[in-house]
Image (cartoon, coloured by chain):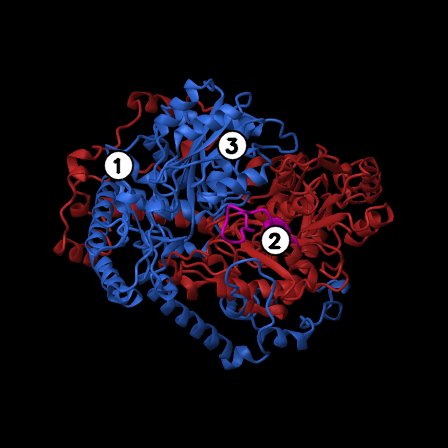
Chain colours: A blue, B red
Amino acid sequence: MVGSVGNGSMDLREREKAVPLPKEFEREEMVDALTPLRPDTVEEEEKGRSREIVLGRNVHTMCLEVKEPEDDDEVTGDREAYMASVLARYRRSLIDRTKHHLGYPYNLDFDYGALSHLQHFSINNLGDPFIESNYGVHSRQFEVGVLDWFARLWELEKNEYWGYITNCGTEGNLHGILVGREVFPNGVLYASKESHYSVFKAARMYRMECVKVATLVSGEIDCADFKAKLFQNKEKPAIINVNIGTTVKGAVDDLDLVIQTLEENGFKDRFYIHCDGALFGLMMPFVKRAPKVTFKKPIGSVSVSGHKFVGCPMPCGVQITRLEHINALSSNVEYLASRDATIMGSRNGHAPIFLWYTLNRKGYRGFQKEVQKCLRNAHYLKDRLKEAGISVMLNELSSTVVFERPKDEDFVRQWQLACEGNIAHAVVMPNVTVEKLDHFLGELLEKRSHWYQEGKLSPPCIAAEVGKINCLCSLHKK
Amino acid sequence: MVGSVGNGSMDLREREKAVPLPKEFEREEMVDALTPLRPDTVEEEEKGRSREIVLGRNVHTMCLEVKEPEDDDEVTGDREAYMASVLARYRRSLIDRTKHHLGYPYNLDFDYGALSHLQHFSINNLGDPFIESNYGVHSRQFEVGVLDWFARLWELEKNEYWGYITNCGTEGNLHGILVGREVFPNGVLYASKESHYSVFKAARMYRMECVKVATLVSGEIDCADFKAKLFQNKEKPAIINVNIGTTVKGAVDDLDLVIQTLEENGFKDRFYIHCDGALFGLMMPFVKRAPKVTFKKPIGSVSVSGHKFVGCPMPCGVQITRLEHINALSSNVEYLASRDATIMGSRNGHAPIFLWYTLNRKGYRGFQKEVQKCLRNAHYLKDRLKEAGISVMLNELSSTVVFERPKDEDFVRQWQLACEGNIAHAVVMPNVTVEKLDHFLGELLEKRSHWYQEGKLSPPCIAAEVGKINCLCSLHKK
């Protein structure tokens, strides 16, 4: 530990037994200091010369610069004071931002205080969860426990599944689609146009032919269009991304109809289905009427996010697939002494412990209660919006409430709503209470009466996005 | 929060204002409980029927099972007690495993106590660090600060670089090679055979032609062979992975010679270089004699791991590339409303804060001192091994000490040494003190005299791996 803050005792012992430094590493051989790059231009740039950015708002100017410590920092304590003040301010902003949050499907209600002492360890589940590594500071025993739980949830036997805890939903999709491609190297990837963008990113990364399928107003895949698209590529196997909850509308693709469409159109035994269950993959199993995601159906993989419904300080996810497919993925890996079936190499060993902790504490029944609560509160939000004359849609068994995009961007940012075109959505997660919804509704209605001058201006028609039946614009209002 | 542990106050408020549950979500409509899958077969399997595993040691049996809470758990406290005991045992094992650790290049010496209160937040730097997202609980201001520091270290102007904080070294390599492929879609990927396995994984994922180049005994790329391989693919652009420290031998490829070989053989302006600086990317800049990694040379990207030299509770890394290349990567992304240039979507927002914290505390000079200490201690280890008659190699300016593989696997596991064939290595990181090395040497020499029956048996010849000059087997010892 250099810089003397922290573990000084080790420093001391080190000094007592100092070994002479080989000549070539003497101080004068080391580079002097980090010279600023064209120092006079930096400031000029800060003043407003913009970086070339393709789209979006560039936040480069919002940066918290890393500053080289002064020689006397250790004496004055200025450095520690500066950092403490930055962190305290940041913490305050996190509290505020966590409070006002409706648009992203993250469960912000967790308490991992019991695990805080583990932050002192560099926990790394290198590579495959089922293959030991010589690196001992891992959490594979927790990871495998969590994977077993999910395999059981999705009904795949212990000796027939393979999986790992990923860094996020995107990694799950990247993995599932890669497995599909390795099983069917010349397969065509099909995904509804409302699929998560990572699916299309995968197609590009993996150089796969990719066909976009139309959706119904609900956001579900349109199987009539799917059939037509399959017909255009009859000779090639099909790899399909099935959405268990789309990002924007929370729509659940009809898995059974997708399978039926494939089998009735000559694709029997020539398809691979990856289920992107980012959020709802963990909610659907707890609701009887929901279409069942299970490996008893001919699916190849399921992924789900861990930081969404479960809640976790950092993004993570779970990926489960059939062991037989992993052998396909791992063949021809002559350059490796071991199986290499994960996308990442070094893997976060803390995430499995967070998930293990929550699964153990809440259990199946705990999740069931939370799912009930979310669905109930989502209905509450939908009903209140509708009463107020705001166009709104809530898919059956979804907790994602889609409604007319608020006119004011500040309001959107304040409540961290995710928007697309004319619509916005709020995702009702376990941390979203009726009080929070009332607070949001109160602000929305007050602002909205200004935006539309108490009825003199018309709110937008969003029938194309939510269907005529859900649209309450002046044209569609009955 | 369901299950009543934790944030009970919110539960209470929630109950006071309960909304009636729509009929379709009534309790009886929910699935009853997680029924075990073929319960009688599970136990049988545990008893020893093995899963099909291609290679390696299967650790499925080491799993910490997730158990469904009993109905009275909240009353008895049994559940909390069980979990606390599991975690306490786990923590003890982490302390022990952290103490005995020489084989992996992770700096285990860090103290992020000041950041422990941030673990309560779900911090997510969704997508591009330079493009704002509506999700407010992020740490982009820290991330950009860290990126600016690294861009300055590798001499790329603020308005000319793009980068992000990755989940690990593999993600950096996946990104760098993807950028290379997007710049030269028909480029051939060249990498020395001692490159990290993620480089070859990338080639397979991205469906790129990949050519393995021979290495010198030191582990560096053999530029004579590189030239010959280039000659075989003259018509296609070259994408090259340059190792700034190979995994096994810590060898640094000669970047200048690689560039010269390319330019002298007709590849001028037809190549893309990605520098895999997993560990040494952050050590080399502090040593004057080391080949300089800088964007003033015609390189395309550099990646480095954050959990290695810096030290971090979870794996992470830094990826820096030229902004102009990112525009190539982001073109034709008609399906996205924004630039999508990262591999992952949701990204760990805690890692940037850990890195920012350490960079601020230690600064450039702090790292310089730590690099000196590591190089000094690595020389100490090499000299002691040599004195004891053990074959050993230490590349100039490396802290990875390669030596004869210990004969006993338990010893290898105890010290968490990384092995390949007949060789093992120890990576001397800032947390590796002379005391720890002495402890290791003491144990090694004692055990070794048993393994080789006090000289009656011969230790292996490792001249092929470390060169005759470094081999102290009976044949090569002078």
| Residue A257 on the magenta span | no
Around disc 2, counting alpha carbons within 10 Å, would you say few (fewer than 14), some (14 to 19), or many (20 or more)? some
Q: Residue at x 51, y 53 (%)?
A: B338
Q: Position of residue B308 (x, y in %)?
A: 58, 54
Q: Is residue B382 above or below residue A68?
A: above
Q: Nearer the viewer, mark 3 or mark 1?
A: 3
Pointer 1 residue: A286
Q: Is residue B365 left or right of residue A224?
A: right
- Which segment is the magenta one? B325-343
Report, in whole angstroms, how far the alpha carbon at label 2 lies from the one at label 3: 53 Å
Q: Which mark is residue A189?
A: 3
Q: Does the CB distance between marks 2 and 3 fall below 8 Å?
A: no
Relative depth, front residue between B331 and A47: B331
Relative depth, front residue between B295 and A142: B295
Q: Is residue A121 left or right of residue B211?
A: left
State the image quarter where residue A150 is shown. Answer: top left
